[in-house]
Structures are given as structure tokens and as C-alpha cells.
Image (cartoon, rainbow, N blue to C red):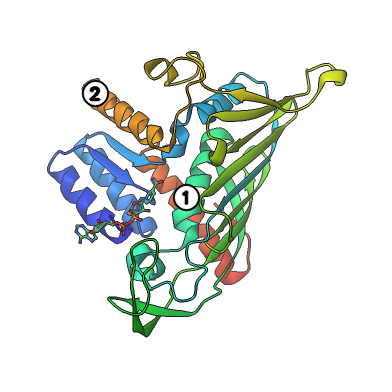
Amino acid sequence: MPQFLHHDIAIAAAKAGKHIFCEKPLAMNLVEAQEMLDAVKAAGIVHYLNHNYRRVPAVQLAKRLIDEGLIGQIFHWRGAYLQSWIVDPNFPLTWHLRRETAGSGPNGDLNSHSVDLARFLVEEIASVSAMMTNFIAERPLPGAGAATFSTGETTNTDKGKVTVEDAAFLVVKFANGALGSFEATRFAPGRKNFNTFEIYGSKGSVIFDLERLNELLFFSQDDPDYAQGFRNILATESVHDYVSALWPPGHIIGYEHEFHHAVFDFLKAIDTHGTITPNFADGLAETKVLEAARKSAETGQRIDL
Ligand SMILES: NC(=O)c1ccc[n+]([C@@H]2O[C@H](COP(=O)([O-])OP(=O)(O)OC[C@H]3O[C@@H](n4cnc5c(N)ncnc54)[C@H](O)[C@@H]3O)[C@@H](O)[C@H]2O)c1
């Protein structure tokens, strides 16, 4: 459901005592995000924000390597989330491209996922500088008309203004001193849903690429110098998170399993009267970063959080 509906529905659900599984981005802005968090806390229900990429076994493995000290002190995060579905100027002005229904463009849609992963794997973000831009100012209004797209959208001959950004690039400093970058765009032909991150530390590095989601590249400074290089770990053994409940070793999983794992953990949290992350508190923290990025892009200033 478009994000302009998340706030009212979540608050009504919380007031009715319902547990909430909410899609990202949590809200349209910081005020809404705070009200949603207040409502779920007051209701004492289980709340989950669906940043599904945390629940890829290879991403959990990256977390484990970091937590066990194999990456050492983290110096750098390099994240990119690149798509291309609106490169055609005739792609219609759907709800995703209007500020009043989407809140933002790839900053909220794509950077929200990457910021969540960076907060999960590296640290909280302490300051942000950003640049955002638009490539196409007006688009055909949706409706039965001139063109039909692979998304099923059709166009009208009348045009309306695009009111969200088309690309949002961020440079950040983390609370632990690491420097990071985020690239999010819907204007990268050839990139359909290219979501990748690289983390570089004093003892090693990891690289994840959603298009090869069963794998994690790991470089260790501790390997003998004659054998150093990125090793490709297939995260499909029973020792890897979630895998023992799925297939035998080497039997790979897909995008949909991220959602299965999220639903499983959400139901487990309800059953055990526990909690699950990421949740609305993470959503609020991430919204602070994304709003600071918006402010930075508008003012040209670096924003401290
Ligand atoms: N976790 C992920 O990886 C992921 C991936 C895609 C989308 N999303 C999120 O999911 C949400 C929906 O995005 P989408 O691309 O699937 O959108 P979409 O346009 O494909 O689907 C939106 C759905 O909401 C329904 N809807 C619209 N207004 C409604 C209303 N007033 N009442 C009831 N239903 C209504 C529409 O009929 C449609 O079925 C967004 O918040 C988006 O950010 C998350």
C-alpha cells in the first residue's frame, strides 16, 4: 500500500490492538513516524518494518563476521541501489512519483533499505550530505491511453509534474567514525533491482550483491599473503541463518524467502510475546537520516543528526 496510507492504517490497527507488519518506508515524514511509534508503544503490540534484505542468510552472515570481529574496525560502507523503470519519459505519473502519495522518490524507496542495512551492519549515522536531482519534470497522467508498460501502467495524453527526486546520492559519517556512501536511482539502464553493499574494515571486507543473494564475498587480512583474495562463501549450509529450516546444503534460495523469513519471525514474536527488528523505532531512526538527507540536498549543507 502506498506510504501515504501507512500512518492512519497503522495507528488505527494499533488502537485496535492488532500486531503490525508494515512496508517500508515507514512514513511520509518524521512527524508521522514518531506518531506511529508512539501508537504502537502505547498499544503494546508487535510492530515490524519490512526491510526484507536483513533476512537474507548471506546478509546475516555478514553481520556475524562483523560481530565476531573478523572485519575489525569498520572504515567504509559503500551502498548502491539502482533501478531503471522510469527512464522512459512516457512512463506515467504513478503514485510513486508524487510527493503527496510517496513522500519521496528513491531516497525513501531505495535508500531506506540501504540505510537500514548500514544501521544494522555498521552503526548509527551521525551526519549526512546529499545531492538529489530530477531528470524528467513532467510525465503523462495515468489512464487508458497511448502506451502500456511492463508494469501494467497506461498513459493519458495530459501531463502532470513529477514532485519527487529521480536520484538521491548520500555521503555519511557514522557514529563510530566510518565514512559511507549511498547511491539510489531509478535512472540506471540495465539495472533492474541492483542492490549491493561493500564494507571495508581493519581486518577484512565483505561484499553482498542481491543478484547473487546466496553468496557473500569475504576478504580476510589474516589469510597468508600468498593466498589472499576474496573468497566466495555460499551461505546455504545449515549453520547459516534460516537454512536449516529450508533445503539441504547448496540448494539455493530466492527473493521470496526474505519475506517468508520475515513472516516467520513476526509470527514467532507474537507467539512468544517478544519483539522483532527492524521495527517502528528503526523506522523513526531511518526517517531521521532520510529527512536530513533531503534537508542537505535542499540547502547544500551537511546535516548533523
Ligand atoms: N519490502 C520491499 O522490498 C518492497 C518492495 C516493493 C514495494 N514495497 C512497499 O510496498 C508499498 C506498496 O508499493 P507497491 O510498489 O507494491 O505499490 P503498488 O502500486 O504496486 O500496489 C499498491 C497497492 O495498494 C492498493 N491501494 C492503493 N490505495 C489504496 C487504498 N486507499 N486502500 C486500499 N488499498 C489501496 C492498490 O490497489 C495496490 O494493490 C510501498 O510502501 C512500497 O515502498 C516494499
At mark 2, the secondary structure is loop
Kindly identify the residue that appears in the image at 57 percent across and 54 percent down.
191
* Circle 1 or circle 2, nearest the eye: 1
Name the residue beneath numbered marker 2: 273
Horizontally, is 202 left or right of 289 in the view? right
Marked residue nearer the N-terminal end (1 or 2): 1
Residue found at x 34% / y 67%? 153
Q: Is residue 267 left or right of residue 254?
A: left
Pick the residue in front: 120 or 97: 97
Where, by quadrant of the figure, is residue 303 drawn?
bottom right
| Residue at the bottom extreme of this rendering | 158
Where 12 sits versus 220, above or below? below
Q: x, y (%) of residue 107?
A: 50, 58
Going by the numbered disc 1, the residue's amino acid type is Ser
The type of residue carrying mark 2 is His
Asked whether mark 1 and ligand 1 are closer than 8 Å, the reply comes as: yes
Query: Residue furthest toward the left?
Result: 16
In the rendered image, the quadrant that contains the N terminus is bottom left
Find disc 1 in the rendering and name its residue.
112
Query: Quick one: label 1, few (<14), some, or many (20+) residues within 10 Å?
Result: many
Residue 9 place in picture, x, y as percent: 20, 52
Q: CA distance from mark 1 to mark 2?
A: 27 Å
- Residue 14: which numbered mark, if any? none
